[in-house]
Image (cartoon, rainbow, N blue to C red):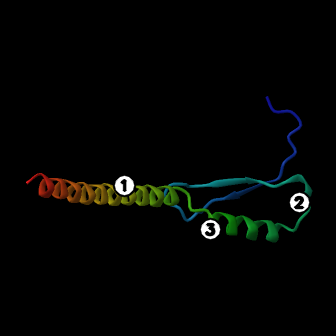
Amino acid sequence: MLKGVNRQIIEIGDTGNIYFEKALLFVRPNFSDSPQNTLSREARDLIGNASGYTGIRMRRKEQRFKKAAFASVCGVVGAAITAAIMMIVK
């Protein structure tokens, strides 16, 4: 049950994102008397700048690359140490 709901909501139908169909933005009470076109423009700017899940994917790709690079460096260092030990032992 909802009581005393007095909020202005802006609904964005086309988010430009393949994952999300709609966005609902709740206007802060102190800005509820702002012109509608200003609120709509700000809402579009916010949705346009929101990266959604693409940022998460990019971070995962970066993390995978960093892990692979670290593993490669460790392998090369390990091989060099092994070669040095083998030269000393002979």
Q: Position of residue 44 (x, y in %)?
A: 68, 67
* CB under 8 Å between discs 2 and 1: no
Residue identified by numbered label 1: 67
Q: Is residue 40 above or below residue 23?
A: below
Kind of residue at badge 3:
Gly
Which is more N-terminal, label 1 or label 3?
Answer: 3
Q: Residue at x 61, y 55 (%)?
A: 22
**59 or 3, nearer to the observer:** 59
Q: Amino acid at mark 1?
A: Lys
Q: Secondary structure at mark 1?
A: helix
Q: Quadrant of residue 64?
A: bottom left
The location of residue 69, given as percent across then percent down, is 33, 60
- Of labels 2 and 1, earlier in sequence is 2
Instruction: Give the amino acid type for the residue marked by disc 2 in the picture.
Output: Phe
Q: Mark 3, mark 1: which one is toward the viewer?
A: 1
Which of the 4 image quadrants contains residue 4? top right
Of residue 29 and residue 3, the one placed in the foreground of this image is: 29
Question: Could you tell which of marks 2 and 3 lies nearer the N-terminus?
Answer: 2
Point out residue 1 in the picture as x, y percentages from the top left corner.
79, 28
